[in-house]
Amino acid sequence: MVTFWWCLLGLLTCGYFALAGYDYGVGMLLPAFDSDERRRRQTLGALGPFFLANEVWLVAAVGLLFGAFPHLEGRVFAGAYVLVVTLLLGLVTFTASMQLRSRRPDARRGAWTAGIVGGALVTALSWGLFLGNLVLGLPLDADGSPSGDVLALFDPYAVLWGLGFVALFCLQGAAFLAVRAPAELTGRAVRLARAFSAPVLAFLAIATGWGFFALDGGTVLGAGVVVLTFAAFAVFRLGLAARRYRVALVGSMVLSACPALLAGTLRFPSVLVSPGYALTVGQAATASGTFTVLGWFAVPAVLLLLVVQWLTWRAHRRPLDQRSLLHF
């Protein structure tokens, strides 16, 4: 039963990165589409139907984490509170700037554009640092309490993950725009996707090689996720080369989900480790009675979320044109 709920949390978390990753990628790539306001609105408009639906996956994942694994939530948020705060600041800045940028047609939009780019950048860096620390091991003492100072969260390996996530989300955003942006922007999106392929591959190769020597306690599941990561990158590159941009987008979405999947499976059933401390999935879980209550709400809600996401993509599967509604 506990494993089932852990897998459900993994589904929601991976779904969030697979979908919301291109939100932040498009936000960071916004300056690459000239200073022409019409083109920038079209770039953001490509996200319009998906933006809020993508964020719901994070809300659902955090809600399930609080309800199903409260002991893990307490340890993780305490051990990485600085990164949680910067992550929230980035998310709020990015979301608010997206929503408010085009509210007044006659207003200047430079500050809101900077908020979108800056918020997306901070969010990408924070997620990379956060997951990198989970993979490396949070700075916790033998009791599971935070140890060391704030700089302990900025280990070089975790910083590599932060920078890698910036490139990864930019690559995903470019792949998304190759599918959804108007025809006149497709060529630039494809060039950006190709440009970010090299830094993403470098991140994957260095993180894998470095982790092989720096990390302890890896499992076969973790090794399988690493293989899946490189396979997803290969699908992305093959789709790009064959001009099958939807295939490339799917490859990039799986690629963005793999780091979260690795963090959850690398040492399973241990789900949180640090020198001298380990927390297993059973120890992190809530009481069995709570799982029964959650089952009445969580499973139907996840099924509804999947259906709504599929319907949204089905209704907006074509690229933008002159008749498309621009939400932002």
Image (spheres, rainbow, N blue to C red):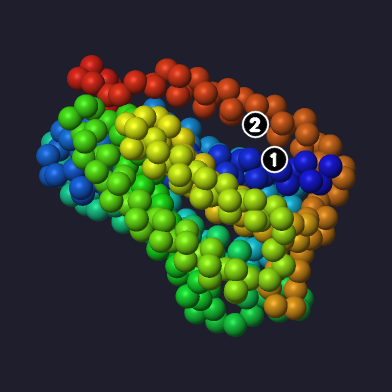
Residue 43 seen: yes
For the residue pair 228 and 37, the one nearer the viewer reads as 228
- Residue 41 in the image, given as x and y percentages of width and height: 22, 35
Name which of mark 1 and mark 2 comes first in the sequence: 1
> Quadrant location of residue 222?
bottom right
> Quadrant location of residue 213?
bottom right
Left or right, 132 with respect to 195, comes to right
For the residue pair 319 and 16, the one nearer the viewer reads as 319
| Residue that appears at 27% across and 20% down | 324
Type of the residue with mark 1: Leu
> Is the N terminus in the top left, top right, bottom left or bottom right quadrant?
top right
> Is the C terminus in the top left, top right, bottom left or bottom right quadrant?
top left
Q: Could you tell me how many numbered marks the image carries?
A: 2
In the picture shown, does residue 130 fall above or below 98? Answer: below
| Residue that appears at 70% across and 52% down | 221
For the residue pair 123 and 131, the one nearer the viewer reads as 131
Q: CB atoms at circles 1 and 2 under 8 Å apart?
A: yes
Left or right, 50 with respect to 297, comes to left
- Count neighbours of disc 2 (C-alpha within 10 A) and say few if under 14, some if 14 to 19, many if 20 or more: some
Type of the residue with mark 2: Val
Cα separation, mark 1 vs mark 2, equals: 9 Å
**Location of mark 1 (residue):** 8
- Count neighbours of disc 1 (C-alpha within 10 A) and say few if under 14, some if 14 to 19, many if 20 or more: some
| Residue that appears at 42% across and 17% down | 315
- Residue 323 in the image, given as x and y percentages of width and height: 23, 17
* Dot label at residue 302: 2
